[in-house]
Amino acid sequence: MDFDYTDDQKFLKSEARRFLEGNCGIGVVRGVLNDPARSYDEALWKAVAGQGWLGAAIPEAHGGLGLGHIELAAIAEELGRALAPIPFASTVYFLAEAILLAGSDAQKTEWLPKIAAGEVIGCFATNERPGALTEAQIQARVEGGKLTGVKIPVTDGDIADVAVVLAKEGGRSSLFLVNLHDAAVARETLETLDPTRSVAKLTFSGVPAERLGDAGEGLALAEQVLNRAAVLLAFEQVGAADRALEMAKSYALERYAFGRPIGSYQAIKHKLADIYIKNVLARSNAYYGAWALESGAAELPLAAAAARVSACEALWFAAKENVQTHGGMGYTWEVDCHLFYRRAQQLGLVAGGAKAWKERLVAQLERRNVAA
């Protein structure tokens, strides 16, 4: 079984890197970071939409490119490498995947072409407080087609046009599509470690809500969306981790101490080797997850959890050790190390923390062993 990209996918990936190097340098990332009034880079968002990337996995019948999830994963890796300050994940990995998974023909016809064209920004609103996502955690309610409740934190909730919301309907949860421009929606932007990916608190006060999928299947559908998103987020994390390693290696070769490059000292060599090992492991698991996602394999929950856990660990470790390799200057605002550390923390929480995914991984392994 070959888990590597095909030649065509490698070409797409190389073109994505070339495009992002020309349109999303570190200056673009810092431009959003330094401006409290900006939550994302609108010019980059429009440029990415023009490339067709938003519709990479959306069927051609609905305005997309109809390529598939492996091609989307290749794009995700390059977006992660560039630390792209745009709501790509919220819109594509969550909103589009939720509609592809559970949407009616009418919902797909209405929303997927708009997503592919970059006309709407989406978000995924499930959590209301810390802890595992369970039926007991959900307090938001839909009665008479109107949603009432609070969701926090919601990535890109302050800039999104539409949200996929998990809420109780009767005694069980369902997924709903909600127009966030309705007057019955209040948004509060929250302060986070990575302002280049904004987060909000959403308060719903009787806003119209349209069910997505079958009634009472909300939690199960949300878990499926999270599995899909976890794989794609893992590729973003792998891309960022590889670039952090490149930064650390480059600095270790050019920084001299006692007449020698610091990369010649064993302590630095060990740091770089440890980053490399974690990155390779994360990439292997991400490839496995992409295969499971593309093929619709029954192993997807297991593969997604493995990809999520290893990718969270790889990017956090690479970002941390990149700072350490740069020494005292690695902690300064002027050096770019902190940008990767910020994104490591953000990506490590956006679909649930590593601890929750480790528990899911163990549960999936136990189920597999029982079945065997």
Image: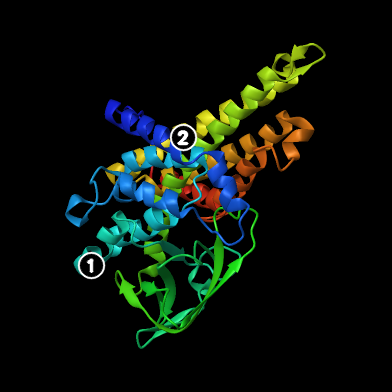
Find residue 12 and report its image quarter.
top left
The correct choice, above or below, for 73 with respect to 346 in the image is: above
What residue lies at 34% left-to-right and 60% top-to-bottom? 98
Report if the CB atoms under discs 2 and 1 are less than 8 Å apart: no
Q: Nearer the viewer, residue 149 or 77?
A: 77
Q: For the point 19% across and 50% down, which residue is it?
A: 60
Camera sees residue 367: no
Q: How many angstroms separate mark 2 from mark 1 (CA)?
A: 38 Å
To which residue does mark 2 refer?
21
Give percent across and percent down for residue 127. 52, 67
Q: Answer with mark 2 or mark 1, whichever residue precedes in sequence.
A: 2
Q: Which amino acid is tagged 2?
A: Glu
Q: Where residue 198 sits: x, y (%)?
A: 55, 59
Q: Mark 2 or mark 1, which is nearer to you? A: 2
Q: How is the image coloured?
A: rainbow
Image position of 283 with respect to 205: above or below: above
* Disc 2, SS: helix
Q: Residue at x 37, y 73 (%)?
A: 176
Quick one: label 1, few (<14), some, or many (20+) residues within 10 Å? some
| Residue 133, position as x, y percentages in the image | 51, 64
Question: In the rendered image, which residue does mark 1 sit on?
Answer: 104
* 182 lies left or right of 69: right
Q: Is residue 33 visible?
A: yes
Q: Quadrant of residue 144?
A: bottom left
Quadrant containing the N terminus is top left
Please tell me whether mark 1 sits on a helix, a strand or a loop.
Answer: loop
**Which residue is outermost to the top?**
259
Q: Inspect the image, locate mark 1, and give the three-letter code of the amino acid beneath it.
A: Ser
